[in-house]
Image (cartoon, rainbow, N blue to C red):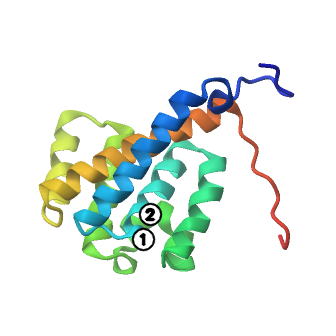
Amino acid sequence: MSVAHDRVWLDKQTPEVFHALNSVALAIRSAAAAVDLGRAVMELVNVRVSQLNGCAYCLDLHTRSAREAGVTEQQLDVLDAWRRSPYLYTEQQQAALILSETVTELPDEEKMAREYAAARQYLSDDQMSVLIWAATTIGAFNRVSILSKHPVRVRKGN
């Protein structure tokens, strides 16, 4: 497949794999609803993981989705420093953010155990499982977008 830039667009080159990844994301959304993880929590995870991975395309997409899900501008504005402003986030949101950072960064075992225990105080095993899958999946989407060099298009009104 010929592309107009220097990267292979993975989603276009191998669409069946990208569709499978989208199916995983849809299954996660359904599982999140079933275990009482609201859309706002899930979008905070998507945005935070995308920040850590530096994926401009996913940040553009998921900050808009987060706003639609009820995440406030202030929460998005300070998300990179959420640990220094915990009063802006619910305990469940903080636990989800702890877990997403751990999944994304894969720290040493000692820190991983501490972070996992901190998240576990506010999340059930089912919720933890869904959040780990969510952070893993958005990380995969981040890599697809970064490696494909998906452009962020300027929106009207900006």
Q: Give the residue at x 44% y 43%.
A: 23
Quadrant location, the N terminus: top right
Q: Which residue is mark 1?
A: 40
Q: For the residue labelled by badge 1, is the local secondary structure a helix, a strand or a loop?
A: helix
What amino acid is labelled 2 in the image?
Answer: Leu
In the depicted view, which residue is nearer to us: 12 or 117? 12
Q: Are marks 2 and 1 in contact (CB under 8 Å)?
A: yes
Relative placement, left or right, of 99 versus 150 is left
Residue drawn 14% across the image and 58% down it: 120
Q: Is residue 121 left or right of residue 13?
A: left
Q: Which residue is mark 2?
A: 44
Name the one closer to the observer, 110 or 35: 35
Q: Residue at x 30, y 53 (%)?
A: 131
Percent position of residue 151, x then y: 76, 44
Q: Is residue 42 above or below residue 113?
A: below
| Amino acid at pointer 1 | Ala
Vertical relation: 75 (above or below) 135? below
State which mark lies toward you, 2 or 1: 1
Most foreground residue, 71 or 116? 71
Residue found at x 60% / y 45%: 55
